[in-house]
Amino acid sequence: MTQPLLAIDDLAVTFSTRNGLVEALRGVSLTLNAGETLGVVGESGSGKSVTAFSVMRLLDRAGRIARGRITFRGQDITKVGRDILQPLRGAAMSMIFQNPRAALNPIRPVGLQIADVLRAHNDLSAGEARERAIAALEAVRIRDPQTRVDAYPHELSGGMCQRVMIAMAIACEPALLIADEPTTGLDVTTQKTVMDLLADITARRGMAMILITHDLGLAAQYCGRVAVMEHGLVVEQAAPDILFTQPSHAYTRKLVAASTTRTSTVASLVAGEPAVAPLTAPKHAASASSEPLLSVTNLTKVYGADFKAVDDVSFTLRAGESLGLVGESGSGKSTISRLICRLIDQTAGTIRFDGEDISAIPTGQFHRSPLRKDIQIVFQDHGDSLNPRFSAFDCIVDPLRVTLGVKDMRTLRARAEDCAERVGLPINLLDRFPHQLSGGQKARVGIARAIAANPRLLVLDEPTAALDVSVQAVILHLLERLRRETGLSYLFVSHDLNVVRMMCERTIVLRLGRIVEEGPSSAIFAAPKDGYTRELLEAIPHFEPNRRSASAAETVP
Amino acid sequence: MSTATLRHVGFILRGNPVTLVAGCGALFLVLVAIFGPSLVPFDPTTSNVPRALQPPSATHWFGTDQLGRDVFSRVVVATRLDLLIAASAVSLSFVLGAVIGAFSGYSGGTLDRWVGRFVDVLMAFPLFVLAMAMVAALGNRVENIIYATAIINLPFYIRFARAEVNVRRSAGWVEAARASGNSHARVVLLYLLPNVLPAMAVQISLNLGWAILNAAGLSFLGLGVRPPTPEWGILVAEGARFITTGKWWLVMFPGMALMFAVLCFNLLGDGLRDILDPRMRT
Amino acid sequence: MAMAATIAKRAGRRFLSSLPALFGVVVFTFLLMRVLPGDPAIFFASGPNAGQAEIDEIRRQMGLDKPIPEQLIYYLRDITTGNLGRSMTTGQTVVKDLVTRLPASLELTFVALMLALSTALPLGIMAALRPNSAVDHVVRFLCTLGVCVPTFVSGLLFIYGFYYLLGLAPDPTGRIDIFASQPPTVTGFMLVDSLIARDSEAFVAVASQLVLPACTMALFVLAPLARMTRASMLAVLTSDFVRTGEALGLSRLRVILVYALRNALLPVITIMGIVFSTMLGANVLVEKVFSWPGVASYALDALLASDYAPVQGFVLLMATIFVMVNLTVDVLYGIADPRVTIE
């Protein structure tokens, strides 16, 4: 019986806040053997990051380990002081973080930052440390390490910053690497390179890794064992194939169902909700031949002197249709959605809505147009898209008051209640302010506001990107139902290809402001023609039980 | 204001005793400004040469000046003028600054660049020197001190409103308001300004202190209010001539009054800021 | 070298962009001085009973009979040739007066700035390292009090305490005790001059004269500096990259000095320009309280005597110093923060 590398036993952590003590962890037990890869999965507030910070003993001042024990290599590190911790950190256990750019010192060259770590744990001269830093950059496959060693973080891309961070973390060959949401905020293709690199390095060096993520697919693909956390407790842990095929805990079942995969449908995401009829027969199929509702021709938006955020984009959208715009950051998808909503002026091109050239109306004047109420938008960050001084009711009826000039309080109230009902927002929440609502509730208010004035086109700008998967599932379900009930047209903007596949009949793939591929969603996903689309599809974390066990067998040293 | 809100305010104030004390101090000053002149024991401008330059005593709490005038009465009476100057100047610059700053921050275009440059130039310049020149140019009158103080306060408000609006102009709810059919002007006036005002109101309290200091500084130099009008800066200036001979009370008491006023407004402002935004606690 | 070039380019651009502002200041002060009350011609006429002819003569000599735009053009032409006019009160050219008096103001300001920085930075850092500790509370108390005391009151109270009561400070008049021997003027900065002359007695005399006004001024800007240092240090200490340093086992000293402090000083550098500006403004009050023969008291006397030229010269000088200070701040910032080089 060998001793585990890390053992967490009944760990409880409390945070003192303005509202008294909050229990972030309520008795977490986990063990990790040398060389093993453990995924810790959970939604926001589940305590997965707190677990990681407790192991590194990096909790901020408000946090306190109330109970339990953390043993690393047989040594109890729950209460030890800095004299013991400092030599361990970086040399025996390391951590990489979310938002790599912020995690690097902005005014120090990355090579020196790696050298700092090396010299903290080894007796090296500056020259030797530099050589080793270059070697470390090479190890994380950064091209041209001789020059990059002198680069500042702002001169590197987000993915490269994360690789530098990995180089720092593994520079002293630690036995344990904790990766806290290492790819959140990175594009899906970058995510794949970073994760492949991490998997390769940990396998090759026999390092143990704890991967903390909200993405069940990602954890399943890269970890030998996955622990699911909810409300500060580990509710289930098992090998990924067991977790996916036979989840035993109710929460795991919900999470697995809500996670989008290649085969999931909107209905399958929310097991238990009333089933939605399949999307095969949209009720406006008849209008397919008639004039499109929205037609965009040669749309171009230039920022500054010559940065083309949107470059000569043309497409059409039929009434009742749902069109997906997919792309990574910088693809121009959000710019397009704002151009169509007439929030920003285009540089060139035309936008026709229901036959009328709305791009001819300057955005500063568009609020007077009768078409204003017909084009509405749902934003990505629901917290940010609600006026903090408006109650949910005020938010929802704002378009009615402004575009339709409705003043009568009873009409407004009735309309707001109707909208709230349609988006599944309890009516007693209407008088609450945004900060008193949960993420899912705010999303519902945002959708209710968008549909309040009975628009014809709804632009959905990453409507679920900021939500936990279980909430995302419910919101997608809701959007799907709304479309069938009202016959709205959707322009669905997302970076998540699986979501777009489920929600849209047709998909446009964007890259650097240009359309690279366009076609029926099923065709694009089944047989992508463009190389970039293929790359995007392959980069989506996916879990295939059989392949995983094979690759796991290979990587075990 | 509902009872729930009142209870909330009460709860917060109990958690911030310093703010409560500062608030009481400010209130006290306002009361002194209103009722002080009718309650003082001596006429602040009547001289009584035989009793000149007496140290503090039971009759003359703060002593007497070189003309035998009662320093206590003069300090109390001065409160009204000093607060009046500061309050008028600050409200003037607040209203102007909030509107200019909000539109500039929202537009973000050429207007914003010009306003930004103007503010930078103004702030880079020794504002006190500017105020001096203005009072000298416009004439030694109380309203000119107000204008001068307002002008040198203006850049702070413009900059503040501009920055606050600027971080919000691309917020989702602003775009949402536009998508709901609000014009630019409506967005600025009905959406952005109400969101920015509480933070700016805190600046009012902080700037009141600064305005009092500036106005008193100008009078100290002999610009603005003229003797024999009692004003804290003038009282200090008159006392300055006797400090090397140890007549400390002439400088000390008006000085303390100045410090007390500025302290109250500053602490109140700090406390309000903490209450409104705990993240800005410094 | 690439960095030096970028910084030079940046500084150059900044200089050019501040020229319109400088011009604006010149025109503004010119106009301001022309609407000042009181006719200087009457003021400088031989006496209250001077005849109209005499006044007109003076007026013509001073160019006051010309239309305002023409006067402005003459004034601008004079500026470019380094002619700022002549002071009516001292009888010297304004340039000469300013040159002799500027070192006094600068010496006072620089010493006060050094004093303030060397106190404020450690205080702010200590407070940030132990938030809500006794140190933090003391610093907060000092800062709160510091901004509340007007310079003219604190200066006078210093005089009362250290000169009248304790007798530690010399007579608070001027830059050096009238009985002490003045070091030969080389730079105009008396501290430096006395060092050059190796005159320790003069150095002590100068320094003791300088201590009170410098402390008065330092106290005034201590609070904003310490506050800013504390706030930015606190923000940096909770930043992600400091956590990275901690997570990878860097020593506490290294984390604080190399990772936290260097980043925390960036915002402090940016407010240096404003702090310097405030100090030059406060100079007027401090120079008056301590009868300091600097440019600010010179301008104040001229202002009260309706003597245009020195005031205009003073304002122009202030504006020029400003442009220079901001350039310096820019260059310093460019060196300290590599991110500004890409814009």
Image (cartoon, rainbow, N blue to C red):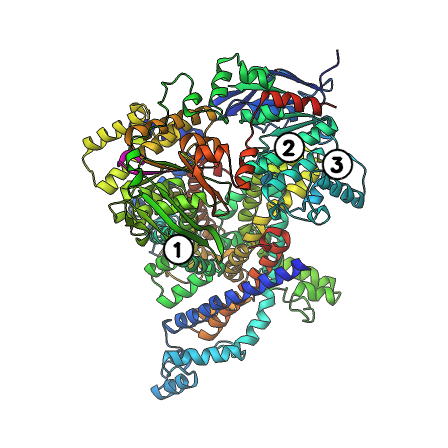
Please tell me which residue lies in front, A29 or B245: A29
Q: Which chain's residue wears label 3?
A: A
Q: Mark 3 or mark 1: which comes first in sequence? A: 3
Secondary structure state at the residue bearing disc 3: helix
- Circles 3 and 1 in contact, beta carbons < 8 Å: no
Query: Badge 1: few (under 14), some or many (20 or more) residues near its Cα, within 10 Å?
Result: some
Same chain for the residues under marks 3 and 2 in the image = yes
Does residue C124 show up? Answer: yes
Q: Mark 2 belongs to which subunit?
A: A
Height in image: A135 above or below C5? above
Q: List the residue tagged with mark 2.
A: A196
Q: Which amino acid type corresponds to the residue marked 3 in the rendered image?
A: Ala
Q: Which residue is label 3 attached to?
A: A120
Considering only vertical position in the picture, is C46 above or below A550?
Answer: below
Q: How far apart in space, not on screen, are marks 2 and 1 (Cα)?
A: 41 Å
Estimate how packed mark 2 is, as few (under 14), some (14 to 19) or many (20 or more) residues with alpha carbons within 10 Å.
few
The residue beneath circle 1 is A348
Q: Which residues are magenta?
A: A450-459
Q: Quadrant of the N terminus of chain C?
A: bottom right
